Image (cartoon, helix red, strand yellow):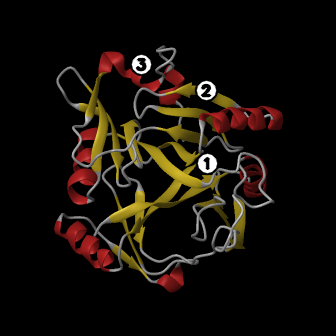
């Protein structure tokens, strides 16, 4: 029982048509629907209907995030557990959510809106299931195969750690701590990867970035080529993290939401002792190769 993985994000964008063009032509996601003022997108090798939903708004940022559950019984399990711990939970009927079954909705201590669901319409990856080729012929841009993780901001890191670890069943893989041992930033997983969800200090409800997976360091370099050719602002990279050991490049969508493509990392054994970085070595953890402070990387988010 429990959370299976990060399912999808709904993000706010300033000009939805321009944003859709960026996400389909540059990032290379596939559009699956335009319904009710929203645009639904998927990574090519995902089987579910969408991993990203665009909604137009005057300011960019995260509208809500959703996690897929391992079983239908988990809806009632988490509904009861959240309510026992003092959280208000709303049941959302499948008929009220496009291409989704029943879900529950609540607000986390970090003031992020969260949904949990079990069923989403399956659309496949565009490949036959008998003797398939390696990938479809119509891929554009960077074309990551799947969504990977998101990093959010919180005004109370210890409270977020307690909530996601003790109530939601995530495992802590890495943390940055103060000299007193208080967590400043945390990385959490449900999929045996270095992180599915992470938090750094910042305003409640903030979105630092969300990331899609690429299969190799060479593909990270190719992503940089695609971004440069498209005139997209690269934030930092290609580079490597000490935290997670991942290879990465960060960049911004047309509204200012930070994106990442990511590869590497390690298998997160559920019995592993969490890795701790001291605050004085935080920038080594973030940018392992150059180990220099880049304050705007932390302070610039939506």
- Which of the numbered marks, if any, corresponds to residue 73? none
Report the side of 169 relative to 248 (left or right): left
The secondary structure type at the circle numbered 3 is: helix
Image spot of residue 163 (x, y percent):
25, 53
Q: Residue at x 26, y 45 (%)?
A: 161
Q: Residues within 10 Å of mark 2 (few under 14, many from 20)?
A: some
Q: Secondary structure beneath disc 1? A: loop
Quadrant that contains the C terminus: top right
Quadrant position of residue 136:
bottom right
Question: Marks 3/2: CA distance?
Answer: 14 Å
The label on residue 237 is: 2
User: What residue sits right under mark 1 in the picture?
Assistant: 59
Whole-angstrom CA distance, mark 2 to mark 1, is 26 Å
Q: State which mark lies toward you, 2 or 1.
A: 2
Q: Residue at x 71, y 52 (%)?
A: 23
Lateral position of residue 149 relative to residue 142, left or right = left
Label 3: which residue? Answer: 284
Do tag 1 and tag 3 residues touch (Cβ < 8 Å)? no
Element type at marker 2? strand
> Is residue 4 placed above or below 153 in the rendered structure?
below
Residue 204 shows in the view? no
- 100 vs 144: above or below: below
Q: Residue at x 62, y 61 (%)?
A: 45
Q: Is residue 34 visible?
A: yes
């Amino acid at each position: 029982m429990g959370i299976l993985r990060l399912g999808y994000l709904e993000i706010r964008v300033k000009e939805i048509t321009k944003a859709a063009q960026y996400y389909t032509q540059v990032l290379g996601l596939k559009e699956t629907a335009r319904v009710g003022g929203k645009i639904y997108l998927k990574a090519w090798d995902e089987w579910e209907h969408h991993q990203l939903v665009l909604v137009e708004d005057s300011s960019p940022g995260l509208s809500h995030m959703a996690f897929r559950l391992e079983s239908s019984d988990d809806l009632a399990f988490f509904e009861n557990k959240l309510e026992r711990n003092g959280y208000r939970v709303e049941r959302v009927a499948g008929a009220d959510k496009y291409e989704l079954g029943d879900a529950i909705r609540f607000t986390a201590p970090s003031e992020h809106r969260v949904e949990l669901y079990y069923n989403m319409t399956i659309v496949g990856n565009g490949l036959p299931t008998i003797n398939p080729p390696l990938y479809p012929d119509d891929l554009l841009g960077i074309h990551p195969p799947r969504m990977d993780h998101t990093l959010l901001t919180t005004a109370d890191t210890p409270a977020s750690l307690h909530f996601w670890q003790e109530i939601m069943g995530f495992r802590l893989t890495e943390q940055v701590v103060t000299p007193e041992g208080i967590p400043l930033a945390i990385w959490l997983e449900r999929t045996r990867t270095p992180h599915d969800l992470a938090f750094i200090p910042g305003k409640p409800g903030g979105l630092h970035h969300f990331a899609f997976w690429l299969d190799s360091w060479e593909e990270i370099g190719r992503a940089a080529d695609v971004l440069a050719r498209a005139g997209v602002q690269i934030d930092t990279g290609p580079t490597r993290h000490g935290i997670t050991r991942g290879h990465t490049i960060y960049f911004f969508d047309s509204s200012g939401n930070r994106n990442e493509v990511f590869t590497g990392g390690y298998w997160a054994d559920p019995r592993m002792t969490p890795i701790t970085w001291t605050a004085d070595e935080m920038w080594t953890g973030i940018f392992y190769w150059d180990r220099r402070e880049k304050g705007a990387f932390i302070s610039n988010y939506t």
